[in-house]
Amino acid sequence: MEPVKITVSSDPSHIATVRSAVESFGDHHGFSREQSEKIGLAVNEAVSNVIRHGYLGDVHQEIAVTIGMVENDGKKGIKVVIRDHGLQVDPDSIKGRDLEEVRPGGLGVHIMKSIMDEVSYRCRSQGGMELTMIKFLPSARESTI
């Protein structure tokens, strides 16, 4: 199956479009509605971070999102890749803030890592960042617990 590719401008109004596409893809590929919504939340946070931190709020930049299925070690799942042309940062420096620190904002990375099974960042050779997130379908045993 071919992946779905979406390119949107970095206007925050497009976050809902990307989230909806990811949730719909999950719904149609074996995830429950609740699971798809959680994956959508992780993607929502990721795209929001690109706009805020990668593009510093510039609404005229490009965000490319690829949604597809992946299989690793016999487990199937959804793979979402988000690419931008924004500021590059050391992937090892991208961490969620301490949850003991009570203040608004700053939970996006924590949310992504708690929802998704795999979250990885890399600097793109042509500039910007690439975020890859994978969520595997729960096994029959896990979905009954």
Image (spheres, rainbow, N blue to C red):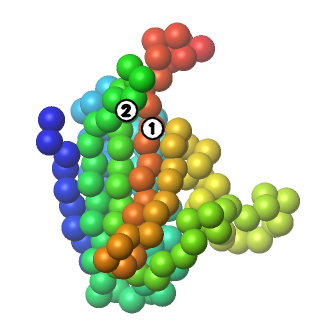
Left-right relation of 74 to 139:
left
Q: Regarding mark 1 in the picture, which secondary structure is present there?
A: strand
Q: Give the residue type that dot 2 points to.
A: Gly
Q: Position of residue 43 (x, y in %)?
A: 43, 56
Q: Which quadrant holds the N terminus?
A: top left
Residue beneath label 2, please? 77
First reached walking from the N terminus: tag 1 or tag 2: 2
* Quarter of the view holding residue 89: bottom right
Left-right relation of 104 to 99:
left
Residue at 39% across, 89% down: 58
Query: Can the viewer see residue 124?
Result: yes
Residue at 43% across, 42% down: 134
**91, above or below 56, in the image:** above
Q: Which quadrant holds the C terminus?
A: top right
Between 45 and 119, the one lying in front of the other is 119
Q: Give the residue type that dot 1 points to.
A: Lys
* Quarter of the view holding residue 76: top left
- Residue at the outermost right position: 100
Residue at 27% across, 54% down: 66
**114, above or below 17, in the image:** above
Q: Are marks 1 and 2 in contact (CB under 8 Å)?
A: yes
Residue 30 tag number: none
Residue beneath label 1, please? 135
Left-right relation of 69 to 140:
left
